[in-house]
Amino acid sequence: MGNLMIRPRRLRVSSGVRAMVRENTLDAGDLVFPLFVVPGSRVKNEIPSMPGNYHLSPDMAEEVAREAYEAGIPAVLLFGLPEYKDAEGSSAWDANSPVQQAVRRIKAALPELVVITDVCLCEYTDHGHCGIIKGQKVDNDSTLVRLGQTAISYAEAGADMVAPSDMMDGRVASIRQALDACGFQDISIMSYAAKYASAFYGPFREAADSAPQFGDRRTYQMDPANAREALKEVALDVQEGADIIIVKPAMAYMDIMHQVKTSFRQPVAAYNVSGEFAMVKAAARNGWIDEKRTVLELLTGMKRAGADMIITYHAVDAAKWLRDR
Ligand code: PBG
């Protein structure tokens, strides 16, 4: 075995050589940091199942957004816990709800930071479903009107981008029309195009107080067994005008990310969801894995699978680790 011609190890001999042949890189500029906004002021309460993530009043959301921005993160994604809930989810499009207040504050303080707002009704309805209930069902078409109204309200507050996560059919087209009719042609739509009915949303639903009060989300979110259907969902959203496509969750859906990346020309975002985050945190806290190495490996894996950007609760930690490297 003295004369092996091809020795892949030659390109792993030193960190310099490894850097030369590295195929994918992870950068703070790839990351989006989600924030949970609550009513009030000076509120910053850690979310128990999501260490390092907080319930933030609008003033504190501005402070945390600044920390993310200073760490090199280009965007935040806002979720809200409203003052009141009703059957229609009307606090979603209330100009004085926490998200609208936070958008105004963050854009005034940090105009360069991209502010994205999640568009969905589940945090705002008293039944916790993502749309309007008729009979025992989530009614698609009456929900579209409310989603459009909600998107307009965020755009009026100054959001740069809206991210519909409800999984109603036709929502991208109807949000696009609603925004354009109000002169918001330049507000982008980042669509949760392939969003699965996943067990990994558990910590989020507790954090956002958005668990459905009856039934589950399987009549609108996708079956985890399906891949072809994801491409159909993405194709529809692209046709309807989605600017950026989200695949969610990330870790169990890397194949979907890869297929979306190779089949479409739209930028793709991976959503590294709350349950994925919590698993890593819990194992790290037990001393079972090295948190920093694990997180950077997972996020790099998402890039390799095809993600152009990653929405992650690890964003600020990861950005700091990348800077110190
Ligand atoms: C709202 C929404 C959810 C998430 C993002 N937007 C919850 C759900 O669909 O039940 C989950 C995010 C996460 O788990 O990190 N529809």
Image (cartoon, helix red, strand yellow):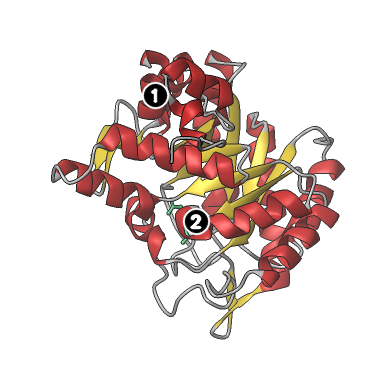
Q: How far apart are marks 2 and 1 (CA)?
A: 24 Å
**x and y percent of residue 90 in the render?**
56, 55
Please determine whether, in this image, residue 149 is positioned above or below residue 28: below
Observer-nearest residue: 8 or 217? 8
Mark 2 crowd level (few <14, some 14–19, many ≥20, 10 Å Cα): many
**Disc 1 within 8 angstroms of ligand 1 (CB):** no
Residue 146 location (% of width, % of height)? 67, 58
Badge 1: residue crowd in 10 Å (few <14, some 14–19, many ≥20): many
Q: Residue at x 41, y 78 (%)?
A: 214
Residue at 71 percent across and 41 percent down: it is: 267
Residue closer to the observer: 298 or 13:
13
Quarter of the picture containing the C terminus is: top left
Instruction: Please determine whether, in this image, residue 228 is positioned above or below residue 175.
Output: below
Q: Is mark 2 on a helix, strand or loop?
A: loop
**Disc number lying in front (2 or 1):** 2
The answer to whether 305 is drawn above or below residue 12 in the figure is below
**Residue drawn at (44%, 80%) of the image:** 215
Mark yes or no: residue 271 visible.
Answer: yes
Q: Describe the element under mark 1 as helix, strand or loop.
A: helix
Q: Which amino acid does label 2 sit on?
A: Pro
94 relative position to 207: left or right? right
The answer to whether residue 48 shows anywhere in this view is no
- Which residue is situated farthest in the bottom direction here? 135
| Percent of width and height locating residue 137 | 58, 81
In the image, residue 11 lies at what x, y percent? 51, 27
Q: Does the residue labelled 2 lie within 8 Å of ligand 1?
A: yes
Total numbered labels placed on residues in the image: 2
Which residue is pictured at 85% across the width and 56% down the height?
239
Q: Name the residue under label 2.
A: 249
Q: Mark 1 points at which residue?
A: 64
